[in-house]
Image (cartoon, coloured by chain):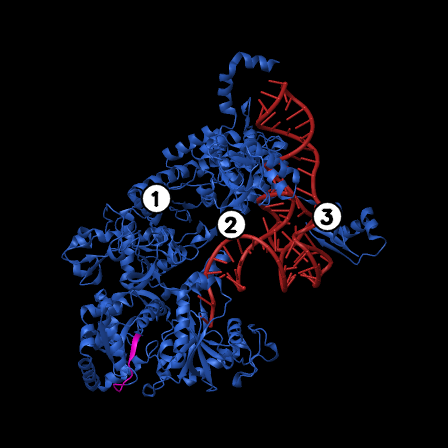
Amino acid sequence: MVKSLLKFIFGTHLRRALYIVMEYNFNKIEQDWKKYWKDNNVYKVSNDSDKPKYYILDMFPYPSGAGLHVGHPLGYIASDIYARYKRLSGYNVLHPMGYDAFGLPAEQYALETGQHPAVTTENNIKRYREQLDNIGFCYDWSREVRTSDPQYYKWTQWIFLQLFHSWYDRKENKTRPIATLIELFEQEGNINIPSPGNDELQFDATAWKNFSEKEKREALMSYRIAYQGYAEVWWCEALGTVLANDEVVNGVSERGGHPVERKQMRQWFLRITEYAERLLSSLDTLDWSEAMKEMQRNWIGKSKGAEIAFSLTPTLSKGEGDGTQEKFSGKEGWQTADVAAYSSIAPHQKELKNSLTEAENILWQRLRNNQLGTKFRRQHIVGKFIADFISLSKQLVIEVDGKIHEQQKEEDHQRTLFFQEKGFKVIRFTNEEVIQDTDHVIEKIKTELTGHSGEKGSDDENENQGKALSFGEGLGEAVTVFTTRPDTIFGVDFIVLAPEHELVDLITTDAQKQAVADYKQYVKSRSERERMSEVKQVTGCFTGAYAIHPFTKKEIPVWIAEYVLAGYGTGAIMAVPSGDDRDHAFAKHFNIPITNIFGKLYSGEEAMSDKSAIIENSDFLTGMDVQQATDAAISALVKLGTGKRRINYKLRDAGFSRQRYWGEPFPIIYVDDVPYGTDEDIFKAHPELQKLPVELPHVDSYKPGPEGQGPLANIPDWVNTPVGQRETNTMPGYAGSSWYFLRYMDPQNDETFADRKATNYWREVDLYIGGTEHAVGHLLYSRMWTKALCDLGYISFDEPFKKLVNQGMIQGSSRFTYKLLQGGLFPVDFDPTTLPEIYISADIVERRNNGDEAANNEIIDFIKQNKGVTAIPLDKKYGYDLSEIHVDVALVDGYELNIEGFKVWRRENVNAKLLLNADGKFICSAEVEKMSKRYYNVVNPDDIVNQYGADTFRMYEMFLGPIEMSKPWDTKGIEGVHRFLKKMWRLYFDEQKGWIVTDETATEAELRVLHKTIKKITDDIERFSFNTCVSQFMICVNELSALNCHKREILEKLAVLICPFAPHMAEELWHQFGHNTSVVGAEFPKYEEQYVRENSKKYPVAVNGKTRVELEFPLDMEQSLIEKEVLADPTIVKWLEGKAPKKVIYVKGKMINVVV
RNA sequence: GGCCUGGUGGUGAAAUUGGUAAACACGGUUGACUCAAAAUCAAUUAUGUAGGGGUUCGAGUCCCCUCCAGGUCACCA
């Protein structure tokens, strides 16, 4: 009565004004403190501090046009909580944020709208920043970096140059400056330093000194960490551009569905393969999830085994001898990069062979079958190049210049250089020469054959012989397989080559020529996708050739089959059907006899692939286990000179070129077609060329350049310099993100990428939080860059991210309406535009689906009524079709549709008729999907923050569940968290009385609640269990409310405790307590056991493991006494049923169990 | 198909070293306050941890098999 009178007198305005102070007015609180933090630079971090450091990093976001949805901040909130906790615990915490701002979407958008990527990126970043600020993160924004900022990519380019000027020293296991390699070459050539990129490359000190500048640079290129090579890209003629792998779907371009083809392009690569072993072994030192490490391990794909050479028969030409001895002389087991090159050339070669030009064909007819006294091979791969015709024994290459070659002048030149370097003589004829005067050409060749071999000194002879027969070059004598099971060598029943294998055409017998050609045609016709989806299908073709078993000397048939991949191992396997499932299926399918080397363990029906087997029927290996037999087999093979231990990696060198605009330009200029780093002496006369950054020039069009080059190729003013031409490719997305964690340490430095003092202080990232999508891309390259920079002495640690936490995805929870589809149902003259759309409530549809006739009739009646039809056709199950249509989740409350909103949402729905359920509601169906604009299930954090406040939003995201788990977003549950914060607020404020915190001394019970909470929160933050933290806060507040506690002694600590989770509220309370500095400078409350310690415990007492009663005993009571009392307890006596207890299990502080 | 994660009420989940399964919330229902609503408060709501077997005094937790879901690589020799 009095209250309502007061209300009447004071009016609503005054009441509201009072409420602002007393109610939990999160909007005002949060805005005030955000401003305060900003104005006072509260989150600025210094590089000078006596405190221990802690570096927390979130994975670099790409600022997309769609902005943040509620899923994105999950990891940011977690890292923010941890950062604030660490700061309160006395650490100097680096917690920066920035943007991975280069990238394809911005360029794509530019192509479509003409807006410059820099502009759209800037806008997107602005929006991201607003959204991030809204959530109250403690980032030190003065350290923000953007990869697209010239002051940033200056150092990306600088690091690239360091990689370009480095090689990998396998002996030292270290990245070293290329100058040290040049020194070594001057002393001893490359005899002891095989090139990782080109293992045919051999020269001594003299040869090196006689090399031209160009030859030297070419040799060095096959050692550099950042190097140039050739790789195939997807080229789309119609779009005039190069496409990424995932832009090619089903063999056509994703956009437009245009045909694509493979095209050779000169590309930059990073020689990450040299780091394979280190990247693998140091994984063990990292605190990452096992799943993540496993993904990296799989990607690196180390397998130990043996490489075994099988001699071939009968297509061997006798004159060339058995080269297997030389094959393995002085070779290291590192082939990955070369195999990569091979697999990209192989299809090319195949193509050429299938389409010999007229001239080539004429010449081939005169060269083949030893007609000139030496064996010629056509379209033969040597190293990275294909020779038109080659005689290995006479070291002669014959090139016929046809149409194809006119487009490849540059490549021809390189090829010639390459062959000459190998000691081959290269002679060239034009098409006309060959066609019009074949005899003359043949005469010329004959002269060369005699002259050339006569010229050679004996030293040369030896060297070249070794060379010619080295790996991958001296083809035709033996086939090399890679196997992880050399112990099964006696079970080899056939050899399988990849259809693209270079030996296939050489060894195929005439009788099998057609069959092999047909099979290769078939393989070619099948898309990648088909090959993948039909894994089980067994296909293959016999070549007619046989290999000789190294021990038994038996002849083994050589097949080709698509299940063997050209790109893995050596592109050839020894098939052991009794021990391998695929080999077994293959043998069964083609009726190849199977040798059993596992005795009874092999049933004849299924391969025995278990590694626990004992080897049988295997000569000297019989009776050994897998490990013993493996070692013994390898030793024996090594002795024979036909095999060696070999470690193989799946990892491939990473392509580092993109034919795009919106990326870092390369600091590379081609002089006379030779690439030079802009920092090299050759540009000394032009200091403007030497300056970094090489800035990305403005372009008017984002269209690709000629021949699939990037858009930069369209700007001659930029490309052409007084000395040479600039590289027109740009760097890929992972360039800038591979080292950004270093830049945060010293982001404004213009002298170096980051001051050594800063990197020595902050070192590696202590905690890195992000999604699993970067498992093998960014995380692997970052690790490699860090190792390289460490090796080169620029930083003093070689792993970037010590601990990694993967946040799960927050999925969207989509809502659907059932809409009636037109068609079939209505009269011919029916005009759908004049009649309303019809929607059916999901619960009615569900009942119909469950066979409820009444529901179906209800729907039919509704349709008839609203569509003006009288009959429903019978040719469909229900006579009509419904389809599930996404509806904006903002229009749905739980599952109930906001009908008015729905009608306004889409114009077609203005007159829509909705069939409601019995309660008069329209229910939507639901499904969990990715959160995405096109599913209308995106929830914007801004909306949540407006409605509930940032503190509620932060705590709710954490409350959803463990952060590494994926879960759908459900706004419903947020009420509970919001209620909790309001309830906590009421411990400090009363609606009427305002601030109600007292200075009374806390009771034991209150202190127990507080310290229990401190312990739980501390432990749980440390183990990243933030959801249980929120629960504990709720328990704490519930208990303090029940105790009616408003005491400063308790509540001040609680305010600090919750600061990492609800920083705005904590700051407000902290200031209400009279502090005039920010709560982030407070001290995190310490747990004190004395307040929690109890001296008795209510034990659950079980009989045979089933809890029957609870009994309380002092904790320090002796076991014998407890046992006595337990056995005397009437309930226990009852459950014992008169039986004597066998023993009593007593676990102090836990439970008691009586065993009968 | 391989590898990795996971499977607990109507829902999100908790149970950290094997020791009282379902804490803390959401939702539902009922009630109090209110003209009514909101807000708040109170009460109420799961016989059993995917299934089968094993180890143990005792298993959601450890071991084996099967099933299911998600992630990842995909004929990797």
Q: In the rendered structure, the residue with mark 1 lies on which chain? A: A
Same chain, marks 1 and 3? Answer: yes
Which kind of residue does numbered mark 3 sit on?
Answer: Pro
Task: Tell me the distance, in whole angstroms, between the alpha carbons under discs 1 and 3.
Answer: 56 Å
Label 1 amino acid? Glu
Mark carried by residue A964:
2
Magenta segment: does it hold A924? no
Q: Which mark is residue A1100?
A: 3
> Earlier along the polypeptide chain: callout 1 or callout 3?
1
> Residue shown at 73%/55% (left/top)?
A1145
Judging by colour alone, the chain drawn in blue in this rendered image is: A
Mark 1 vs mark 2: in front = 2
Local crowd size for mark 1, using a 10 Å CA cut-off: few (<14), some (14–19), many (≥20): some
Q: Chain of mark 3?
A: A
Colour-to-chain, red: B
Of badges 3 and 2, the one in the foreground is: 2
Q: From mark 3 to mark 2, how far is it between C-alphas?
A: 34 Å
Q: Is residue B17 left or right of residue A1060?
A: right
Residue type at mark 2: give it. Answer: Glu
Please determine whether, in this image, residue A1072 is positioned above or below residue B25: above
Q: Position of residue A307 (x, y in %)?
A: 42, 77
| Percent position of residue A728, x then y | 24, 55
Can the viewer see residue A752 in this picture?
no
- SS label for mark 2: loop
For label 3, the crowd category at 10 Å Cα-Cα, with few meaning under 14, some 14 to 19 and many 20 or more, is: some
